[in-house]
Image (cartoon, rainbow, N blue to C red):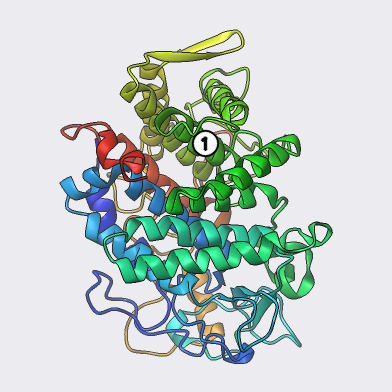
Amino acid sequence: MILLKMLFQAVLYSGTLAGHYPRNTPVKFRADSGLQDGDSAKANLTGGFYDSGNNIKFTFTTAYTMTLLSWTVMEYQSKYADIGELDHVKDIIRWGSDYMLKVFIPPNSTAGSNLTLYSQVGSTISNNNEPNDISCWQRPEDMKYERLVSICDGSASDLAGEIVAALSAASMVFIEDKDYSGRLVQAAERVYEAITKEDPTKQGTYSMVDACGKQARMLYNSTSYKDELAWGATWLFLATKKADYLAIATAMFISAKSDESSFDKGILYWNNKLNAVEVLLTGIRYFHDPGFPHEDVLKLSSNSTDSLMCSYLFNKYFSRTHGGLIILKPDNEPLLQYAATASFLSKLYSDYLDHLKISGASCKTDEFSVAKLRDFATSQVKYILGQNPMKVSYLVGYGDKFPVQVHHRSASIPWDNRHYSCDDGKGWLNSKEPNPQVLLGAMVGGPDTNDNFIDQRTNQRFTEPNIASNAGLVAALIALQDPPYKSHNIKNSLWGWT
C-alpha cells in the first residue's frame, strides 16, 4: 500500500540511537553519545534509544517499542522479507534488546539478593538549576551535564512485566540464533520469576515510587500494572510454550479486565496493553486452542476483541474528527499514536478472521465484516499520510507537505563540527526556520480534535515524534502492506512459529 520500505530506509530509529553510533546507518548527523550513561549508578547503561525530541532514555517505552516491533515481525515476517526490510527491523530490535539486557540485575547476583531495574537515564527535574535533558536544548553528542539514573526494585511490576514482554518477544524474532534467543528468554524468565515472588501488597507501578519513577511522571506516568504482568506472561508462554505462563497470563488478564479504567479503554499504547493481550489470547484460542482449563477465559478474550473492533467501527463508542481520525483519548493529545495502533489491531484481527474463513463477527447489537475492519485500518493510516483537512502528511519526508519544524534536538541543530551549549541550543529551538536535518520517517504528534495542526518546534504536542508512537505506525503499515503481497500466511506468522 504505501511506503513501508521508505519508512525503514528513513532515519527515525537511526536518529534516536544512543551509545556507540553504528557507521552503517543512513543518518549522517549523529555520532557517539551517552557513553557515560549509567556511571552514576556504577552500571553500563550505554546504548538504547533516546525517547523522543529530548535526550532521555525511558526503559518503559523502549521495552514497549521493542515488544510491538517484535510482534509485527512474528506476524508479518514474510512481508518484511518481501520488501527487503526484515534484516533492518531485526537490527532495530537487536539494538533495543541488547539494551534490555542491561537494565536489570536479577536476584541472587553478586550485586544483591533483590531484583534491580533501571527505569531511566537522564533527568526531567533540575537540581540547583543545573541543566537537564528537558531544560537544555542540545544534541546528545554535546551533552556534558550529569545524567542521573532512576533505580527501581521488584515492586515496579509494570516495568518488569514490560521488560519480560520485550525480551520474550525478541527471543522469538531471533529464534535461529539459538544462543542469543536463549539468553533473552532465560533473562525474561528470571525477571518474571522475581516479580511473581514479590509480595502482592507491594506490587505496583514504577512511577509511584520516587527513586524509580518521579522523573518519569510528567511524561510517562504509569497508571496500572496488571496489564503488563498479563502482557509479559503471554509473551513468555508464546516464547516457551510452558503452560504455567498461560495460566498466569489468563489469571492476570481477568484481574486486569476487572480493574480496567474507562480512561484507557480500547486503547493500545505505552500505558495500556490490555487490548493487545486480548488479541493475543484470542489468537491462542483460534490457532492453538489449549483446552481445559482455559476455555472460559479465552472465550472472554475473543468476545472482548470483538467488542474492541466494534468500538473502533461504530461512532457511538468513540467520536471522529471532521476529517475522520478516531478520537480515542479526547483529553490527551496527540491523537495519532492511538489511531495507529487501532489501525494495526483491526487489520491484524481481520487477518485472523480471514485465515479462519470467517467473514465477520458481532458484539451485542452490532455486526462487522472483515472488509469493514480493513477499511477502518486503511482510513486511519491515510489520514496520517495526508488525506486530512490540513492536507499535511504527519510522516516527515512523505508527500508534498509535511512538518519541517520537528521538535527534535538532533534534527534542529546544524551538524557542522561545532559544539553547541545549552544556551546556543535555545536559538535553534526558537528559530522560525525549518530544521537543518530532515528526520525522515518520523511521525509527529499530529493534529488536535478539530483537525488543526501547528508546525512549530516549540509546540511539541503537535511536532514531537517518539519511538513508541512510531512503532505503532510501523505496525499499521506492515499489516496493511498487502498488494502485491499475500495478506496473512499463517505458517509464516506468530501462529506458525509457536
The percent position of residue 15, horizontal first and vertical second, equals 37, 69
Question: Is 417 situated left or right of 198 in this image?
Answer: left
* 31, 362: nearer the viewer: 362
**Residue 143 in the image, given as x and y percentages of width and height:** 51, 86
Check disc 1 and report its element: helix, strand or loop: helix
Q: Residue at x 42, y 90 (%)?
A: 419
Residue found at the very far front of the displayed protein:
292
Q: Residue at x 28, y 44 (%)?
A: 399
Q: Quadrant of residue 371?
A: top left
Residue 393 visible somewhere in the drawing: yes
As drawn, which residue projects farthest toward the right?
A: 201
Query: What kind of residue is marked 1?
Result: Leu
Image quarter hosting the N terminus: top left
Where is 295 relative to 95, above or below?
A: above
Question: Which residue has dot 1 on it?
Answer: 281
Q: Nearer the viewer, residue 468 or 421?
A: 468
Q: Residues within 10 Å of mark 1 (few under 14, many from 20)?
A: many
Residue at the outermost top position: 365
Q: Quadrant of residue 438?
A: bottom left
Q: Position of residue 490 (x, y in %)?
A: 29, 34
| Residue displayed at 37% across by 49% down | 395
Viewer-closest of 286 and 437: 286
300 is higher (above) or lower (below) than 23: above
**Is residue 431 visible to us here?**
no
Residue 341 versus residue 104 in the image, above or below: above
Quarter that holds the C terminus: top left
Residue at position x 50%, y 49% from top?
237
Count all numbered tags in the image, as a single digit: 1
